[in-house]
Amino acid sequence: MTVNIFKVDQYQTAVFTKAIRSRFDILRLWMDSIKIIINYSEPAEEIAAAKIHIHNSRMSRLFYSSGAKTFSISFPFRVEKIEGLFTVKTASGIDIDSRLSSEILLIASLLKNNGLVNEWALAEHFEDQGGAASEFWPVLSELLGAEDGYLRFDHDPDPKRLNGHIHPLDHADLFYTNGASFKVGLYKRPDLEEIVDIVNRETDCHYLGRVVVRK
């Protein structure tokens, strides 16, 4: 397994603290993460606020860890380091550079704010901007069809949010839309290594124990 670790400063963490509510938020998170990776400069220790771990093997995932919150999403890209510089490629081998990531960020914002629009409207939008990169359409199509596999682990001591077994201190949130999301309560706060092990297909499975809660 190849693991790349990127420290992010207190300003860059704003990218990762925005709520995930839609597929377009996932697109934005992917592209913002890629911008950090391909332009990476390790921050000074005193301003480092979080880390992103990219695991590439049979499992290709991004893990973000800061304070009480850790989340993970599928990362349908390959990260390579060549002569000290990082590159990011799609599963089909297309290099994601600053221009392409900016175009996808723009479209993610446009789609989120205006709803789904047809490809003619998108083409017209880019024509007005001088045209999109030649790789834009195949990459956008590839990413819209990619599974995101979002899950989040929270340690939430806020007394206003704690609510017995409805919202326990430690829990995992699976999925992100109101119609699909649900919580799994945890007896203790898992560290990052445990979380990686839970989702790693190359290690033994973890089991959910059935507990009957009497009211």
Image (cartoon, grey):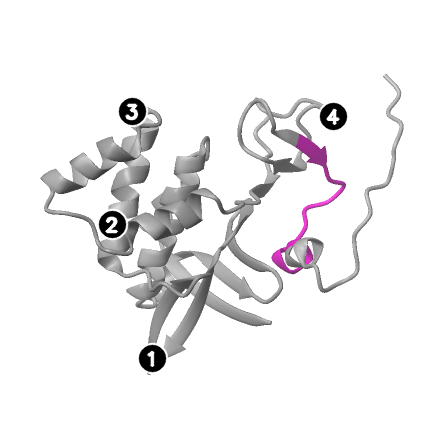
**Amino acid on which the number 4 mark rests in the picture:** His
What residue is shown at x 89% (from left), y 27% (from top)? 212
Q: Mark 3 highlights which residue?
A: 114
What residue is shown at x 40% (from left), y 66% (from top)? 93
Q: Mark 2 highlights which residue?
A: 102
Q: Is 76 a magenta residue?
A: no
Q: Are marks 2 and 3 in contact (CB under 8 Å)?
A: no
Nearer to the camera, 42 or 3: 3
The part of the chain drawn in magenta is 183-195
Q: In this view, does 8 lie above or below 129?
A: below
The secondary element bearing badge 4 is classed as loop
Query: Residue 7: x and y, percent?
Result: 41, 62
Which circle, 4 or 3, is nearer the viewer? 3
Inter-mark Cα distance, 1 to 3:
40 Å
Q: Locate residue 215: give its quadrant.
A: top right
Q: Mark 4 highlights which residue?
A: 165
Marks 2 and 1, the one that precedes in the sequence: 1
Query: Residue 127: x and y, percent?
Result: 13, 41
Q: Mark 1 highlights which residue?
A: 84
- Does residue 182 appear anywhere in the picture? yes
